[in-house]
Amino acid sequence: MATLDQKSPNVLLQSLCCRITGKSEAEVAHQFQFAVRVIGSNYAPTIERDEFLVTEKIKKELLKQRREADAALFSELHRKLQTQGVLKHRWSVLYLLLILAEDPRKPSSRVGNYGAVFAQALPRDAHSTPFYCTRPQSLALGYGERCAGLSASMATSGISSLGVYTLNGPTPTPQSLLAGQPLPSAVGGASSLGSRLAWALPTSSSPSAVGPATIRPPIGPLLSTTRALRPRQDGDAADEVSEAALVRDILYVFQGIDGKFVKMSAQDNCYKIDGKVLVNKSLRDTSSRLAELGWLHNKVRKYTDARSLDRAFGLVGQSFCASLHQELKEYYRLLSVLHSQLQVEDDQGVNMCTESTLTLRRLLVWMYDPKVRLKMLAALVDFCQGRKGGELASAVHAYGKTGDPQMRALVQHILSLVSHPILNFLYRWIYDGELEDTYHEFFVASDPNVKTDRLWHDKYSLRKSMIPSFITMDQARKVLLIGKSINFLHQVCHDRTPPGKITPASKSADTPKDAAELLSDLEGAFQEKIDAAYFDTSKYLLDVLNRNYLLLEHLQAMRRYLLLGQGDFIRHLMDLLKPELARPATTLYQHNLTGILETAVRATNAQYDNVEVLKRLDVRLLEVSPGDTGWDVFSLDYHVDGPIATVFTRECMGHYLRVFNFLWRAKRMEYTLTDIWKGQMCNAKLLKTMPELSGVLHQCHILASEMVHFIHQMQYYITFEVLECSWDELWNKVQQAQDLDHIIAAHEVFLDTIISRCLLDNNSRSLLNQLRAIFDQIIEFQNAQDSLYRSALEELALQLQFEEKKKQNEEEGQWGVTAEQEAEEKRRIREFQETIPKMCSQLRILTHFYQSIVQQFLVLLTTSSDESLRFLSFRLDFNEHYRAREPRLRASLGATRGRRMSNI
């Protein structure tokens, strides 16, 4: 006994085989292997819990007894019993009734016995197979409970209707099942045989759900004739290849392994039988059709092998590979069952004198659904080549638009796995503002080189190519805004409120099952989550900007100061600045102008503005050009920083500066014409004593009136039609804005509108040049009139002085004037009168030049595409004064009116 204890069980078993057979160890090798397989397997009869099969047997028994009415009644009662769910163990009750009804003296059928033997031949230890892989806990689909009906079908008839296979977790690829190697165990036992036989995608996890709607009835003996396996004889090499040999080869080809007769042809890129091999034509054709599964398998396997080790493929890509591994795993489970059946037939089929259940035609039927699914996977792999991240999810989603419910369910499951990382990215972004996208798979991109002051505009953006097709552009924009708002609050506004208090985080997609549920209701639950986070976060951000950073007050300050909306302040500022701005620009000092600005603030209603606003108001001097005066370089400035600089960007402040310079220049023209009118009114009575000036003064009054009309109409257009209307639209949009982007967009539209309608855009450059030329003529006219009045007043003063001296001399009893003094006085008067025609000529030239510029300006206005500018031309020439002088203007106005009438 001590010697026996030291020997291994294998040695003892081999010794037992030798003693029983009376042969040597070399001669009992086959028996020894069979004995090891028998000991390793637990032979026991099995009964599969297939409710559908039991009901079918009961109905068949009733039909055999010619009780058709009872069979129909039984079918109806069984259907009602399934819908009510009164009994939890319906199969047990039905099986008991079937057993009680059977005649114990009746022998069992040969096919049923063979099915039992086939079930017994399968080892119980599932962990001995290289295909075994524990299903992840997160994907517990109840495979064994859902597909139990299939195993009984195979055990009874040897043939099963192989439906759609179950989707489980990823599994390692099986090792090649080479001839001569021990076959792997495909199933854990008789009770779990159904979970290993078929690729089935059940619609319910309840065992009672398995019925005619989800499992096809057993096919039964499909073919009338099958070839029995025969041992290979010497000298058969030149004979025709048997179907059994082809079946064995095909099973290897299913795994992408070349068989003895069926091999991969590199030239034709397919598996085929060599033309030199003698094979029946029908068998050759059937083998070629079956070999397509090996080609499809290789295509999918090649993709997964290449991508599984590629880290740059990202989480979405790895999820896609994992879903493909799941499909291949179920495919391998089916192949392991077929190999096990083939092994049983090799070992026991001949001794039992039974026919083979593995034929090419039966394989063609059994592998139909797996072939369809592999075709779908291969097409999906082709379509997904070169894609990653959201683009890969879009490709998978596109394949889900099919009318085949099984294929749609397959793609939906793959999509749930593929979209799981994307939804995790999304929830981290909208609830925490965190973006951990190492492989650039998410549709929100971040630029780490952007500074904080440009965070809102430049740091985060949408990768349009990575937006999954099941997410709309509006949803993607909201997702971007939500996370961007959270980061803006933390980094720019320095708001430390936790994101959970801004918007409560809902349940995220923790598992692919959660992702699948969310994807099934994209317009419902998913949209509600996005909308809730969007509205809560955006509202909180706007509240912070208005409450802590006075966004709306700064916006109104821009309107009052930079757009000259505070009339009393602007008028008083011009009065104070007039002496300074009349000097050359090079002699100005900013601190002096700043002091004048503060004085104007304290003297007007501007002093009641918020201190935060007034301290940002400042003076700015533009770049000086030769010959510039203070009027040309002076500008108001408004300092912005922090969060409000997101709305008032450098580009926006540049637009404000351009508009301010234009409005300041137009306001200066109004101010200048006011001075011209005041000068005319004040000097009118003084110069009545000089009738020789009446003509030139009349000319001045007429030209001044033309200029005043022009400037008043331009001021009305700028103030009311441009600024006030645009401001009202802006303010309404700001009050209705739902997020910061809406405010920024409305503000940009406001600036673009006033830039365009104030003739400051590129399309209005010619109009602006003409308008500036008109402004220059007004300044020239002011200088000419000032020179005229200065000369006239000097002459008037000398004449009055001469008369006063003459009167004084007469009062003293002397001659009023001498002949020499009188001659000198007449000479001086004559010289002055000689200058009057020159002044008239200068005024006529100035008038003609001014009117020609105005006429050209009107022509450009009438041909403008902007309707408000065309209406401005009507107001400027309301009495058709310029139209009578300019033929082009008559043609333009006529064409414009014709177009307007045709539109009416």
Image: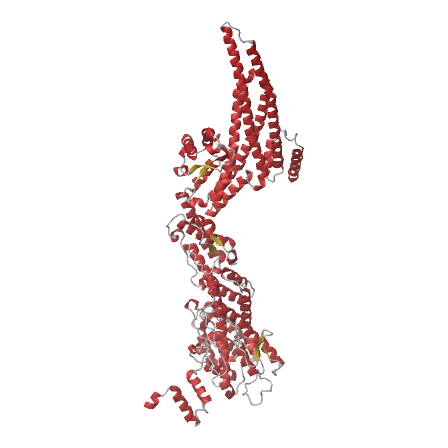
Q: How many marks?
A: 0
Nearer to us in this view, 800 or 694: 800
Q: Is residue 369 left or right of residue 593?
A: right
As drawn, 327 above or below 615 = below
Nearer to us in this view, 810 or 369: 810
Toward the bottom, the furthest residue is 22
The quarter of the picture where the N terminus appears is: bottom left
Residue 74 image position (x, y, % from top left):
50, 73
Q: Can residue 636 be seen from the camera position used here?
A: yes
Residue 116 image position (x, y, % from top left):
48, 82
Q: Is residue 692 left or right of residue 497?
A: right
Residue 354 image position (x, y, % from top left):
53, 86
As drawn, 487 above or below 606 = below
Q: How is the image coloured?
A: secondary structure
Name which residue lies at 57% across and 33% down: 773
Figure quadrant of residue 845: top right
Residue 147 image position (x, y, % from top left):
47, 73
Q: Can residue 112 be seen from the camera position used here?
A: no
Q: Is residue 673 left or right of residue 139?
A: right
Toward the top, the furthest residue is 813
The quarter of the picture where the C terminus appears is: top right
Toward the left, the furthest residue is 2
Name which residue lies at 55% across and 24% down: 785
As drawn, 127 above or below 697 = below
Toward the front, the furthest residue is 820
